[in-house]
Image: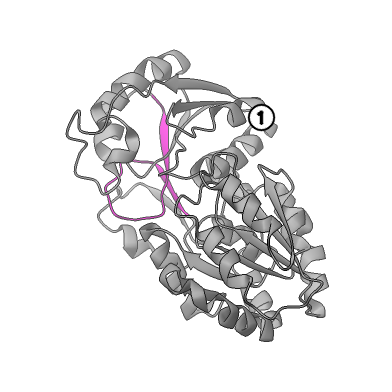
Amino acid sequence: MKIVIRVDASPQIGTGHVMRCLALAEALKEKGASVEFICREHKGHLIERIQNQGFSVYTLSNTTKPGDFEYGNLHHSAWLGETQIEDADQCRPVLDNVQPDWLIVDHYAIDQAWQSELKGAFRKLMVIDDLSDRHHQCDLLLDQTYGRQEEDYQGLVPEYCQMLLGSQYALLRPEFALWREYSLQRRARPELQKLLITMGGVDSDNITGQVLHALATCELPKALEITVVMGAIAPHLAVIKAQAAAMPYKTKVKVDINNIAEIMANADLAIGAAGATTWERCCLGLPSLLVVLAENQVLIAKLIAQSNVAVVLDKSKLPRTCLALHSLYKESQEYSRRSSEVTDGNGVRKVLEQIL
């Protein structure tokens, strides 16, 4: 079986789309599928990361400057770097050469215009979405948003489209399921010795720095260890490292790590973005304080808050971090239990069954 995945990363897009596609690609590869990627060379593209994991990447040059053309009418149109038609034209030679059984698209700037343009260049199309804000011409649609319902896509996908909806389908790497039992067992006796901060691979607004500033004024256990996880493309990385060194609590900054599941499993509480890593923390039952960093995270945060799965804090209210953190710790066992019910970490396997 031949698979082609169209996905991008950049400071605007973030790294989550590529990371979840890599989790799926690894599982497909283990089943004997040939998996290749198509990515545009945006700043912070992660192409080398994909190649280092053993996958071929067809690169699309990033030569167009903002304002050179009318991007389109989608809310995230500018994230593509070209019009949908131009991007499709650039992808066509790759698809004609590979002739994939499945084309998988994970991109907020792509809808049925791009998909229809490439009709006939693949056997089946899978779309990974989180927004339910545009039309798709696909055979399979995955939306791992907690609480997502079929009516959210009514009229947006063909009647024949099979939909995999909800956080039980979250595309997590296998290590999260492996660390799940250990992580859940150690939360039987709540303590606050290790705090994890993870605002995604980019954090262009330096929310991490604001959180550290707030934590510096908190009355927390003196022996507390804070671990900050960031991506190498994060624009404020150097500033955060300097800030960490000046913290009143032992604070480490880790960059582009490959053992995040282990770190999460051994953390007592977490402060993180309300994006894709939400499902990772839920799988491990890690009580979390969620910060909404982008518009596409608003719905996730709203549903999470309504179900008391985590404590949600708007980024405009970061000075209240201490109060929110104490509230989280006070009921950490309940937050751990509720969050662990959101996903069991086996989403990739469930999605794989439908593809294969």
Residue drawn at (44%, 68%) of the image:
315
- Who is closer to the viewer here, 316 or 19? 316
Residue drawn at (20%, 33%) of the image:
67
Relative horizontal placement of residue 113, taking residue 15 as reference (left or right): left
Q: Is residue 343 above or below residue 92?
A: below
Residue drawn at (60%, 52%) of the image:
240
Q: Is residue 76 above or below residue 322?
A: above
- The image position of residue 279, as x and y in percent, is 58, 60
- The image position of residue 157, as x and y in percent, is 30, 49
- The image position of residue 102, as x and y in percent, is 47, 31
Q: Is residue 1 above or below residue 225?
A: above
Quadrant that contains the N terminus? top right
In this rendering, does residue 151 appear at all?
yes
The image quarter in which residue 80 lies: top left
Q: Which residues are magenta?
A: 122-143
- The image position of residue 100, as x and y in percent, is 47, 24
